[in-house]
Each structure stands twice: as structure tokens, then as C-alpha cells.
Image: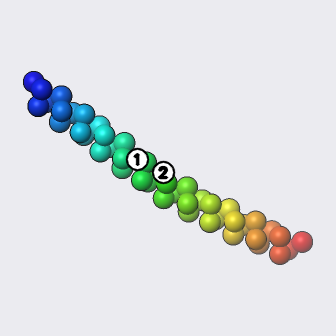
């Protein structure tokens, strides 16, 4: 019983870690995309 709980908690924790890594990667890509768009819109003025 205890092993099942520990395994469940580990699976949930690993899922959360993977989600956080993906969110951080996407956020950094969005930041670079936003800065590129801002740079392009500034150069057009």
C-alpha cells in the first residue's frame, strides 16, 4: 500500500516537473518572439 502511494506521488511529481520545463521553454521562446516583433515594429516607424 505504501509503495503504491509513493509511486503515485513520484509519477505526479515527475509530471509537474515536465510541465514546468515545457512552460519555461515556451515562455522563453515567446519572450524572444515578442522582442523580435517589438524590434520589427520599432524599425518600421
Q: Tag on residue 23?
A: 2
Question: For mark 1, what is the residue?
Answer: 19
Residue 44 vs 6, above or below: the answer is below
Q: How crowded is mark 2: few (under 14 residues within 10 Å), some or many (20 or more)?
A: few
Q: How is the image coloured?
A: rainbow
- Res. 44 image quadrant: bottom right
Q: Do the residues labelled 1 and 2 touch (CB within 8 Å)?
A: yes
Q: Where is residue 43 in the image (x, y as percent from the top left)?
A: 83, 75
* Up-down relation of residue 40 to residue 19 (above or below): below
Which residue is drawn at the image coordinates 51% and 57% (left, top)? 26
- Quarter of the image for residue 35 reads bottom right
List x then y, in percent, for residue 23.
48, 51
Left or right: 4, with 45 as reference point? left
Q: In which quarter of the image is the C terminus?
A: bottom right
Near-viewer residue (31 or 45): 31
Residue 42: mark = none
Q: Quadrant of the N terminus?
A: top left
- What is the quadrant of residue 5 in the picture? top left
Secondary structure under the numbered disc 2 in the rendered image: helix
Disc 1 to disc 2, how far (Cα)?
Answer: 6 Å
- Compared with 34, 1 (above or below) is above
Judge left or right: residue 21 versus residue 10: right
Amino acid at each position: 500500500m505504501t509503495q503504491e502511494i509513493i509511486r503515485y506521488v513520484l509519477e505526479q511529481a515527475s509530471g509537474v516537473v515536465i510541465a514546468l520545463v515545457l512552460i519555461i521553454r515556451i515562455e522563453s521562446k515567446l519572450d524572444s518572439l515578442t522582442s523580435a516583433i517589438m524590434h520589427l515594429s520599432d524599425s518600421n516607424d
